[in-house]
Amino acid sequence: MVNNKPVTPGDNRAMARLILALPSALRPDALFPTLPAAAPGLDKLLRRGDPLVPAQSLTGLACRFLGLPDEAAPPVAALTALGDGLEGTSGYWLRLDPGYLEPGMGGLMFTPASRLDLGLEEARALADSLRPYWEESGAGGRLLVPAAGRWYVTLDTDPDLVTTPLDRIGADYLTPHLPRGRGAMAWMRRVNEAQMVLHDHPVNRAREAAGRAPINGLWLWGGGRCPALPAQPGTLLGSDEDILALARGAGARAGPLPDTADGIGDARTLAVLPSLDDGHTLADTLADLDRRWFAPLLAALRLGRRAELELHLADRAVRLTPASAWRLWR
């Protein structure tokens, strides 16, 4: 009898030769019906694999892969700070990432700076306008900007916040994901006042005059002290700069994604494929990924050339072995 009960991946990391993630802003009910025709290889992998408990976000999946705390709010700020060349091993670190706040029918929505072509000089000019308030008033610790889309606040004490990873929000409204905890009200007041400073900043006036979205919002997340670094962190490949910074900070090998699955070696690897977003040619994108990734991986499993594959897509995650790849009845 086949057991279809989802299980949480364990710590036997030597077995996990390849973990493949396909982030998507699409709802599962819009995505999965397109798979049989557009991506038959991916469809077969999902049907034949044993279900896993999916990670709550790409950040959470990367933490699980690296052997770091896999929590609803993983303390990644200190590690991404290390990956950005900062000294993240002491004190409490928070991410204070910039982006675009816009109203929707059900509340505010947030687009991170990584999708808004924000330059480092622009980012530092915006941050400089916040420093007299943020640092000199003692309101919120030092503000550091090593990368355009990754801003940091350093503190001596725990601010008592529970936050949501930025990549978990997706296309949701912000209200369900706002910080919680005893310090949340005071910190959100600080953030709101800082956003008012950004509202009429010369950088934003220039961006709007050029038809670009202003940087009028800030998102707190990833808070905590630096966790113990993993002994064997593995290899992480992709183009998501947040995840690559996390990998570098944890001591993992981080690099670009190869063009095809054939470019993945035998080392334990997490490969993050390009995100699927609404408004693009979904069927063509899936067909291309199926040709270069999913169909070759299915064939490699069936021939015993891959010991194990984990696949994470939207709210579904599966594990496959050479034996499960032959479940033709599924």
Image (tube, rainbow, N blue to C red):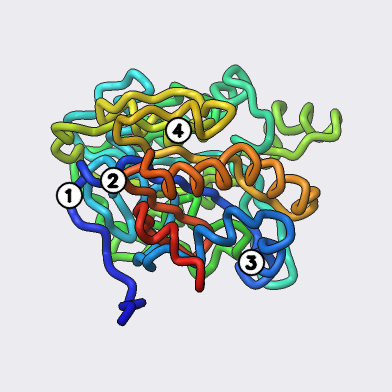
Q: Residues within 10 Å of mark 2 (few under 14, many from 20)?
A: many
In the image, residue 132 sits, relative to residue 187, either above or below, namely above
Name the kind of residue labelled 4 in the image: Trp
Residue 55 position within the rendered picture, expressed as x and y whole percent measured from the top left: 38, 59
Mark 4 or 2: the one toward you? 2
Q: CA distance from mark 1 to mark 3?
A: 30 Å
In the image, residue 317 sits, relative to residue 29, either above or below, namely above
User: Residue at (27%, 32%) from the top-left corner?
Assistant: 234
Most foreground residue, 31 or 130: 31
Mark 3 or 4: the one toward you? 3
101 displayed left or right of 141: right
Q: CA distance from mark 3 to mark 4?
A: 36 Å
- The residue singled out by tag 2 in the image is 16
Q: CA distance from mark 1 to mark 4?
A: 34 Å
Residue 262 position within the rendered picture, expressed as x and y whole percent measured from the top left: 50, 30
Q: Secondary structure at mark 1?
A: loop
User: Residue at (53%, 31%) from the top-left corner?
Assistant: 239
The mark nearer the N terminus, 3 or 4, is 3
Q: Secondary structure at mark 4?
A: strand
